Amino acid sequence: MIRLLMCMAHRRVRRAGAAMMLLCLLQALPAGAQPVFDAAHVGQPGSGNHAELFMPAAAAPVPALVVLHGCDGVGPHYRGWAKALQGWGYAALVIDSFRTRGQVNVCNHGRDVPPQDRAQDALRAAAYLRSLPAVRADRIGVIGFSHGGWSALYAALEDALPASRSRAFDAAVAFYPACDQPTARLVTDTLILIGDADDWTPWRRCQRWRDTVQSDVHSARIKVYPGARHGFDSTMDLHRYAGHLVGRNGAAAQDAEILTRAFLAERLSAR
């Protein structure tokens, strides 16, 4: 607490002060509650750092997204999405929630890294993005895939905010997520994209999530793609992975990209 009070004296510094305050809040937490996301380990695209920041060529400040990888960890697929977002004019921060916890792959045992913990990673990553002069602090979203989509849904709920001391995301997109029963009110407009042939994360659970989550003003949308499997936006053909049939469905991938771009533009790019 003493550290926190001492650090709060730096609040008179604006943008630099935002980063200072983030560091102070992290230092004030008990050792066991330290978040895994660490702004000191943000690197360039492909650097292999705990987080990789893709910045667009557009004039600053720009909207931004936190990118949450699937159960297989950071890889080309998620960097590919970050590059696409970069091309759309967004800053994209890909964060690694596994190696920092001593994990590499949690497929079929996803609760080894609980989605609630990754939601905290995402919210703290958003706080870091808000400290950057090149990023619009009022236009930050989250996009996740599979395990990362599951985590994005938790990050879109009200009960995720107090622990991270962060404001809510401005948009959330979840590709083929696992969908638990919602634990709190929705505080972020959310889009779920999933296939009806997914044998890993059943779409009906996500439909129930959409139908039961409580919200006063925020929307929860779901698009279910006929015949699409888990990982339908992959560049790989259908194949077995971890006991499940996964792989690309071209029609679903194309439509999902169009919907995602429009959804984000409406919530993050509007002036």
Image (cartoon, rainbow, N blue to C red):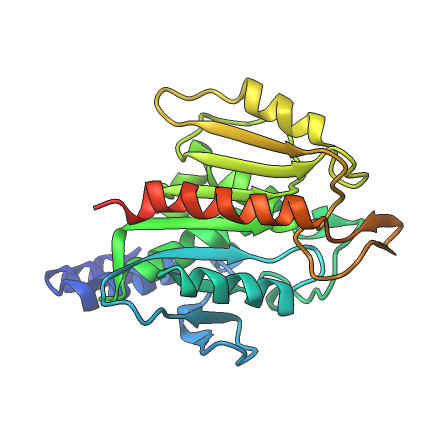
Q: Say if 115 sits above or below 103 in the image.
A: above
Q: Where is residue 270 in the image (x, y as percent from the top left)?
A: 26, 44
Residue 139 picture location, percent across and down? 30, 49
Answer left or right for 108 relative to 20: right
The reply, left or right, for residue 25 in relation to residue 204 is left
> Whole-percent x and y of residue 267?
34, 41
Query: Which residue is at the front of the view, 265 or 28?
Result: 265
User: Which residue corresponds to the image point at 51% horizontal and 36% vertical from the top-left?
Assistant: 191
Given residues 36 and 258, the one toward you in this image is 258
Q: Say if 47 sits above or below 95 in the image.
A: below
Q: Can residue 96 be seen in this view?
A: no
Residue beneath the point at 89% across and 50% down: 243
Residue situated furthest bottom in the rendering: 47
Quarter assignment of residue 178: top right
Determine the residue located farthest toward the left in the rendered image.
12
The x, y position of residue 184, in whole percent, is: 49, 26
Q: Is residue 207 left or right of residue 27?
A: right
Q: In which quarter of the image is residue 176?
A: top right
Q: In the picture provided, is 243 more to the left or to the right than 92?
A: right
